[in-house]
Image (cartoon, rainbow, N blue to C red):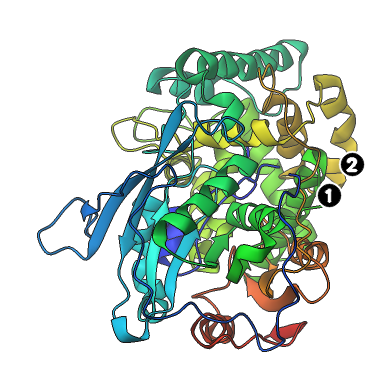
Amino acid sequence: MRVRGRARAGAALAGAALLVTAALSGCDSAPAPPQSSKGPSPRASEKPAGNTSALGRPLEWRRCGAPEGGTAPGSAWRCATLDVPLDHAEPGGETIGIALIRRAATKRSERLGSMLFDFGGPGGSGVDILPRAASAYGRLNTRYDLVGFDPRGVAASSGVRCRGDEEQEKAYREVDMTPETPAEEAAFIADGRDFAAGCVRLSGRLLPHVGTTNAARDMDAIRRALGDEKLSYFGISYGTELGGTYAHLFPESVGRFVLDAVVDPTADTVGHARNQATGFQRALENYLKSRGEAPAAGTRRVAALLGRIDGHPLPTSSGRELNESLAVLGIVAPLYSRSSWPALTAALDEAGNRGRGDRLLRLADSYNNRDGQGHYGTQSHSQRAISCADAKARPTAAEARALLPGFRRLSPVFGPFLAWDTAGWCAGWPVEGEHDTPEASAQGAAPILVVGTTGDPATPYEGARRMADELGEGVGILLTNEGEGHGAYGRSRCVTSLVDAYFLRGKVPADGHVCS
């Protein structure tokens, strides 16, 4: 169960992009002179979009990606593939293709340049998400070309694959993600190692090269290929970590940057799990209070339900059973957005009062990218590969077991799952992680708007404060959204208005501004 910054299209379509896990650089660029307090200067509106790849080959843009899905004559969307080095340390070696999608600014005479998006994950496909989410960014599209991409190791950019649908189904059905016996613990760790072995077998050559630092270098290649002097960027959830890494590596190339639903750059593997136990418990308590239920009593009720399901999985109309692991994911999913809280109420009522698991299972399937025919998406494969390429920590089962009492105190519902996740996620991973925590210092960069929501479950608000501090004085500009859910843009009128003014007019809000 990895829920750190994982991308999800539903939240993007609601205007706030996306869900759940975050992965956890060195600076090779000299800092630029300090920027004016009036904000970054826009790119020249007459500068055309570039069409040359980082390796000197032309980008070939073609019609694609109608918002309804698929390709349609007259679609405003164009797709291309950017060739970049598989290993940036060997620029003349093997290449990898980065899939791009673009919709041109609608007011060409007022065009500021391109705006690159990353909707989270790691593992979210920008090529897939952006056309379906674009209506939320209509004002920005008046003056910016909207550009999405699949980061390396994701979807159309040589997406990592690790196991098939049957193996995935078997794991969700048989592996207890909160093992309580030696046999369950052995099966849990063995499944992590089996997943890693599948990644090696199916995608081994990619695994050393899919980390966040390499994706940030690809972003700079995208900037150059698009013909922009500075990069304008909208990063959500894990996309904030990617944006912070880019700002550290290329501070002189930072244009107008917004980081929304911010991953804590100071947290290591255990710290992220602890943050999320806090964040999801906070969101659960806010949900319970909205229903007039005392948070402590409501938490005990939900934890007791999960305990019953652990011993006796619930039947569903599909013939599949709802076990405890899937039930937790079914509770996690609707906590990302307050608009989904009624679905959580219905699902908990069905499970607790009727002894049926249909609704929670549907929520878990949506979270796991499982369709009605039993096919799973590969986002979780990419997510694990990127996370484990980034994070050095490889906690053991004994270390996870030692975390349990403290995590249970943080959250009786989510704590055990997140404690065990620290050991299972990168078990047996063949590639050493790059760092304990990512570097986000970006002195000399233009002001970067850092947006944190007080009720965010997956990337708790405290991470936004720490990101703003890590970016540096005068660079990280904190904007607080007092509200619920993962991401603020499109959900809060105040935040949306301030972000639009920043992107369109270069108007930087006062550091510490609060939208209530």
Q: Is residue 404 above or below residue 483?
A: above
Contact check, label 1 and label 2, Cβ < 8 Å = yes
Residue 289 appears anywhere in the view: no
**Amino acid type, mark 1:** Leu
Looking at the image, which residue sits at the far left? 73
Question: 148 or 329, which lies in front?
Answer: 148
- According to the picture, the residue beneath numbered tag 1 turns out to be 410
- According to the picture, the residue beneath numbered tag 2 turns out to be 406
> Residues under labels 1 and 2: Cα distance?
6 Å
Residue 325 falls in which quadrant of the image? Answer: top right
**Which quadrant does the C terminus fall into?**
bottom right
* Label 1 element class: helix
Question: 185 or 426, which lies in front?
Answer: 426
Where residue 15 sits: x, y (%)? 45, 70
Residue 279 falls in which quadrant of the image? Answer: bottom right
**Amino acid type, mark 2:** Gly
* Residue beneath the point at 75% across and 63% down: 31
Mark 2 closeness class: few <14, some 14–19, many ≥20 residues within 10 Å: some
Mark 1 closeness class: few <14, some 14–19, many ≥20 residues within 10 Å: many
Question: 365 or 212, which lies in front?
Answer: 212
Where residue 98 sits: x, y (%)? 41, 42
Residue 207 falls in which quadrant of the image? Answer: top right
**Which quadrant does the N terminus fall into?**
top right
Q: How many marks?
A: 2
Where residue 39 sits: x, y (%)? 64, 83
* Label 2 element class: helix
